[in-house]
Image (cartoon, grey):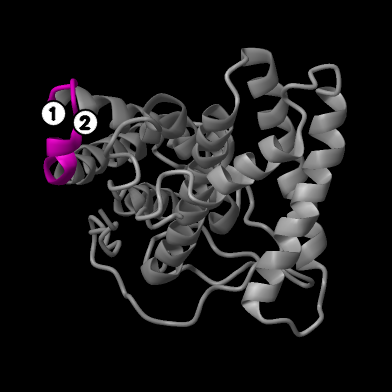
Amino acid sequence: GARPPSSARPPAPIVRAGAPAPRLGEGMVPPPPRRGVDVDRFLAQVHANLYNLVGEEVDRIYDLEPSWSKSELTRRLVRYLYSAVKPPELLSLPWEDATARIVEHAMQGCSGACQDKPWFFAIDLAPALASAAWELARATGQARGSVSQPRPPGSPPPVRFRQLEEVVVAEYEDALDLALMTKAIWDATEKTFHDPTVLSKVNRTLFKTHAKVLEECMLDTRPLEDIKRVEQFTRRWMDAVLRQAWSALESNEAVATEETLLRLFRNLVAPFGERHVYS
């Protein structure tokens, strides 16, 4: 199912308006290391919020969970998210960098343990992550309305909740896209090859060449229709895979054939079946 809109509920009244906060640039300095932060109180508030928000999402998607109890699933997810907020260096980072790190590290834990779960792409953890990042911004005096030490000249303006939430959602969706692509490439490779050594080599090559070719295509500034860009990317990717993977498999003539390459890319076009939204 599609993920619902993110709408984290912050634990304190929030002003939800204003333009996105600027990134650090010329003339702006990062906030100084935070002094006087009650870390235990901050982490306790984060943990309580996570249990409430994650618990609500677990209730919503629990019919897709095949084995874990509700309490076990909630406990596991809270642990991954909570661990991402605990590193002390986050207290000295600008809110935008800290927020991105929280989402990245939380999703690494969730993806590694839960990516194959039927509910993984249906659950929406963005509200819980936004709540955790907001508590950090409040604790470090970077949130609008928070009480903090005087702001040094040139420091970024305090962040509003809506601005922070937008960063969380963007980072969260990027993490889901990466996890989905990882699964798609592996599933397509597994449908095409059966030898574990071949599977590993081709999967590695697909990832390596995908990133390189995508970067090259993004640098092409010619005014092309979207379908033309997709065709251009696919052709370049196929060429790159043909050169690199096939050279590694040249000793296996039964595998390194044009027919096999075409079958691989047909599987990549619709890795989860033709009706899946990702296909």
Vertical side of 162 occupied by 33: above or below: above
Corner quadrant of residue 248: top right
Vertical side of 162 occupied by 140: above or below: above
Q: What stretch is highlighted in magenta?
A: 59-70
Element class at badge 2:
helix
The residue drawn where x is 32% and y is 75% is 15
The residue beneath circle 2 is 74
The residue drawn where x is 35% and y is 35% is 43
Q: Nearer the viewer, residue 14 or 5?
A: 5
The residue beneath circle 1 is 70
Q: Residues within 10 Å of mark 1 (few under 14, many from 20)?
A: some
Q: How far apart are marks 1 and 2 (CA)?
A: 6 Å
**Is 71 placed left or right of 17 in the picture?**
left
Say whether residue 72 is visible.
yes
Say whether residue 154 is visible.
no
From the top left corner, tell me how far across and down residue 170 is, in percent. 49, 61
**Is 200 placed left or right of 221 in the picture?**
left
